[in-house]
Amino acid sequence: MSVQIKNVEKSFGALKVVKGVSVDIADGEFFVMLGPSGCGKTTTLRMVAGLELPTAGEIRIGGRDVTYEEPRHRDIAMAFQDYGLYPHLSLRGNIEFPLKVRGVPEAERRTKVESVAQKMGISHLLDRKPGQISGGQRQRVALARALVRNPRVFLMDEPLSALDAKLRATMRTEIKKLVTELKITTIYVTHDQIEAMSMADRIAVMKDGDMVQIASPLEMYERPQTKFVAEFIGSPA
Ligand code: ADP
């Protein structure tokens, strides 16, 4: 589903941290918000998720105005850097949790968990607990749990920053392949330009609560519109 962000602003007290952001994200697009720490990426993502309310502007998902709608009524899933897995539940228990709370019957849960676990290459681990697997595997479990409901929009906030460089590179490819296969619209937050350049259909470079430039990785690299973008992307001077 498409996601539209229209003149969205967010203030915390007197501090305006998102300053009128607008972008149309197409159905199935992999959209990356890239920028230094504190530029408003997470806050923007949390407004799409419904975890923060904008102080101005509008958010539409699949054409529907969801600006003030609760998170559970939005057809979205989220994954964060800290996996947020339940340590006392098996991996199966973790992955099926979002289905269980929605009252999906056991047989259907089983099929769905097995299908997503297979896609993530963790089928053989389902009876283990989060403490008994590696960081990379925990990341896969978190992704499986996010995707088991087959959401149409997937929001990721620095999902790979806790992993070492080698695993990050592997997971970049895996995530990209997975969401492309599933045709999910993805909004991905990172401060890592390599992640942005290698995964995005389009990148928004953010600075001080604004999207300074929105472009494909190639266009951003070849035609950065400001010095800040050029330096952040690492374009030749
Ligand atoms: P980024 O994800 O780009 O690092 P954030 O969206 O997390 O940036 O934060 C943008 C700014 O908003 C920062 O200055 C941060 O300190 C501030 N901020 C974020 N959340 C809150 C909050 N709940 N209360 C007050 N200030 C906040």
Image (cartoon, rainbow, N blue to C red):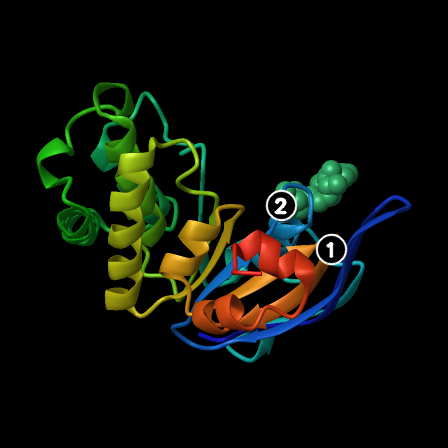
Question: Foreground: 237 or 87?
Answer: 237
Residue at which label 1 appears: 209
Residue at which label 2 appears: 36
Which mark, residue 218? none
Tell me, yes or no, if residue 141 can be seen here.
Answer: no
Q: Label 1 sits on what residue type?
A: Gly
Q: Quadrant of the N terminus?
A: bottom left
- Vertically, is 51 above or below 74? above
Q: Label 2 sits on what residue type?
A: Pro
Question: Foreground: 89 or 54?
Answer: 54
Query: Ligand 1: which quarter?
Result: top right
- Vertically, is 168 above or below 107? above
Residue 26 place in picture, x, y as percent = 47, 77
Label 1 sits on a secondary structure element that is loop
Residue 10 place in picture, x, y as percent = 77, 55
Residue 66 place in picture, x, y as percent = 62, 68
Q: How many marks?
A: 2
- Vertically, is 199 above or below 126? below
Residue displayed at 67% across by 64% down: 211
Confirm if mark 2 falls within 8 A of ligand 1: yes
Label 2 sits on a secondary structure element that is loop
In the displayed structure image, the side of residue 190 where residue 195 appears, left or right: left
Confirm if mark 1 falls within 8 A of ligand 1: yes
Residue 198 place in picture, x, y as percent = 36, 58
> Tags 1 and 2 in contact by the CB under 8 Å rule?
no
Residue displayed at 42% across by 59% down: 197
Tell me, yes or no, if residue 167 can be seen here.
Answer: yes
Q: Quadrant of the C terminus?
A: bottom right
